[in-house]
Image (spheres, grey):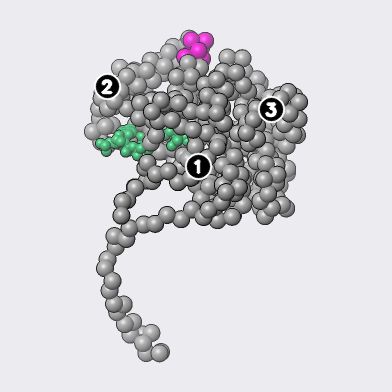
């Protein structure tokens, strides 16, 4: 029996949603190169593509955007429930609780038809940014800002967080990150969603579980880890010395390495380009220090270990420069990946097979159960 720890290299099913091509470090969504989608399309169009298989025409896009914008507000019960969660909990816990609560409130919870699941997916796409923004503000003692239906997905999120819409360069960088984060085949959180779905459980349960999987620092939590690490190092001149010590201590360096890409993440060049433009625009000493440190650590990691950065490396610093608090970074990843997760949930249901691998037992050999004298007295 061959054991594939971590399912490394195991192909468990087919998918029509995206391909991660290891040999060429490339990624396509429904056949379109992700770089071209990031350069030419809005995030909402990519969401539509992932769910429906084709890019929307202008009429389809208008209808899609109108439905998304109408679904953004939270009802009072949800807002009150989320406001009662301890501020000490991570915002991913808030998001996980919110999705679980949306499921409990949804009267069509057990209708798993593709149309019903698409409607639920759109509801989550629309409401998750409202939850993330309100939670960020609550932690600063600020009231939530209601969504603005006249603003696009990315613009509205900034507006709900900060009360203003940023300059076009910042907005573009954010939108690029959403497109790049949207989908990545059978990554750990998507696979989690597919496992839950394979038992014929409901979409909210699958997404709740996926949020839990994304939270971990070896997956989506790494974008927060990147910024914590940059703060810990502080000075670009300390990058090499810090790295050597961290590697000697067998620490995992956040934002580096990937299970599939071994020669570099296909999404990094475009995200790094967008980050470089943000840095050039800001041009203040603190931004320059962070960007220099970011580059120094990347070079040192490549030199010491031959390991390339993954998408979380440029995205983490970009989100910091955009003004988001570090604990909001992985929730922003969720706002994007909700599209990929739910596309996979629909696909799993269309060709379902219960996901249940085997394990090779390595525990004690068969042994006799000693008699429990007090129980024996009763028999
Ligand atoms: C959006 C995303 O989810 S992308 C991933 C985000 N996660 C991170 O950035 C966390 C840091 N990275 C890692 O922990 C890993 O690279 C993972 C989990 C992403 C991939 O792990 P795997 O595919 O299992 O690779 P694996 O852990 O076998 O790595 C191979 C070797 O490279 C080392 N390595 C890989 N990544 C790193 C890293 N970031 N820091 C230090 N060493 C690393 C491993 O220690 C291992 O060394 P060894 O052979 O001496 O034991
Ligand atoms: O594919 C993976 O294993 C992790 C990743 O990059 C993602 O989910 O975007």
**Residue drawn 48% across and 10% down?**
280
Q: Which residue is mark 2?
A: 303
Furthest-left residue in view?
Answer: 248
Q: Which residue is mark 1?
A: 14
Mark 3 or mark 1: name the one nearer the start of the chain. Answer: 1
* Position of 282 relative to 41 (above/below): above
In the structure shown, which secondary structural element does the residue marked by tag 1 occupy? loop
Judge whether residue 277 is colored magenta: yes
| Left-right relation of 348 to 62 | left
Mark 3 surroundings within 10 Å by alpha-carbon count, few (fewer than 14), some (14 through 19), many (20 or more):
some
Which SS type dominates the magenta stretch? helix
Report the span colored magenta: 276-281
Of residues 173 and 235, which is closer to you in this image? 173
In the structure shown, which secondary structural element does the residue marked by tag 2 occupy? helix
Q: Which residue is mark 3?
A: 56
| Left-right relation of 266 to 39 | left
Location of residue 74 in the rendering, given as x and y in whole percent from the top left corner: 70, 40
């Amino acid at each position: 029996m061959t054991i594939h720890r971590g399912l490394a290299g195991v192909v468990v099913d087919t998918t029509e949603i995206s391909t991660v091509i290891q040999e060429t470090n490339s990624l396509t969504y429904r056949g379109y190169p992700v770089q071209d989608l990031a350069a030419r399309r809005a995030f909402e169009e990519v969401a539509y593509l992932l769910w429906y298989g084709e890019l929307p025409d202008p009429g389809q896009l208008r209808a899609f955007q109108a439905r998304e914008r109408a679904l953004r507000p939270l009802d009072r019960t949800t807002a009150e429930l989320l406001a009662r969660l301890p501020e000490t909990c991570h915002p991913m816990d808030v998001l996980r609780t919110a999705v679980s609560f949306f499921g409990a409130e949804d009267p069509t919870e057990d209708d798993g038809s593709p149309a019903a699941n698409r409607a639920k997916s759109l509801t989550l796409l629309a409401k998750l940014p409202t939850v993330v923004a309100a939670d960020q503000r609550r932690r600063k003692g600020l009231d939530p800002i209601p969504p603005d239906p006249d603003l696009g997905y990315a613009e509205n999120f900034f507006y709900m967080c900060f009360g203003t819409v940023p300059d076009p360069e910042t907005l573009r960088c954010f939108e690029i990150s959403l497109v790049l984060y949207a989908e990545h085949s059978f990554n750990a959180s998507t696979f989690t969603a597919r496992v839950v779905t394979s038992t014929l459980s409901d979409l909210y349960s699958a997404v709740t579980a996926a949020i839990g999987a994304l939270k971990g620092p070896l997956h989506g939590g790494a974008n927060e880890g990147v910024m914590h690490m940059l703060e810990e190092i502080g000075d670009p001149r300390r990058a090499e010395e810090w790295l050597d010590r961290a590697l000697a201590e067998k620490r995992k360096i956040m934002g580096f390495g990937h299970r599939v890409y071994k020669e570099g993440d296909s999404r990094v060049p475009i995200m790094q380009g967008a980050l470089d433009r943000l840095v050039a625009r800001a041009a203040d000493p603190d931004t320059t220090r962070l960007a220099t440190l970011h580059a120094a650590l990347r070079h040192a990691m490549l030199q010491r270990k031959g390991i390339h950065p993954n998408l979380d490396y440029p995205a983490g610093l970009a989100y910091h420069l955009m003004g988001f608090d570090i604990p909001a970074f992985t929730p922003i990843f969720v706002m994007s990946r909700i599209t990929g997760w739910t596309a996979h949930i629909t696909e799993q249901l269309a060709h379902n097979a219960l996901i249940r691998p085997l394990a090779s037992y390595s525990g004690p050999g068969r042994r006799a159960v000693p008699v429990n004298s007090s129980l024996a007295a009763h028999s």
